[in-house]
Amino acid sequence: MHCVKLLGQCLTARDFDCQVAEFKVRVAVLNGFTALGSPIN
């Protein structure tokens, strides 16, 4: 959860469905950064 908060402390969307979409985008970005930092075996 700490890494997700590094992308921003609060959600900017007001509608719940938009908040869910915004959070999914943040998680996708975080997963992309994690994939870039992982060693290739």
Image: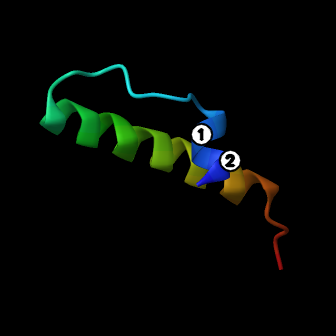
Q: Quadrant of residue 13?
A: top left
Label 1 secondary element = helix
Q: In the shown orientation, is residue 36 left or right of residue 28?
A: right
Determine the residue positioned at 48% across, 49% down. Answer: 27
Q: In this rendering, does residue 23 appear at all?
A: yes
Determine the residue positioned at 68% across, 58% down. Answer: 35
Determine the residue positioned at 39% across, 28% down. Answer: 11
Distance in Å between CA atoms under marks 1 and 2: 14 Å
Residue 37 on image: x %, y %: 80, 55
User: Which residue in the protein does label 2 denote?
Assistant: 33
User: Which residue in the protein does label 1 denote?
Assistant: 5
Kind of residue indicated by mark 1: Lys
Q: Quadrant of residue 6?
A: top right
Q: In this rendering, does residue 32 appear at all?
A: no
Q: Is residue 9 above or below residue 1?
A: above
Pointer 1 and pointer 2: residues touching (CB < 8 Å)?
A: no
Kind of residue indicated by mark 2: Phe
Considering every residue shown, the one lying at the far bottom of the view is 41
Q: In the shown orientation, is residue 32 left or right of residue 37?
A: left
Residue 31 on image: x %, y %: 58, 54
Q: Is residue 15 above or below residue 23?
A: above
Q: Label 2 neighbourhood size at 10 Å, few (<14), some (14-19), many (20+)?
A: few
Q: Label 1 neighbourhood size at 10 Å, few (<14), some (14-19), many (20+)?
A: few
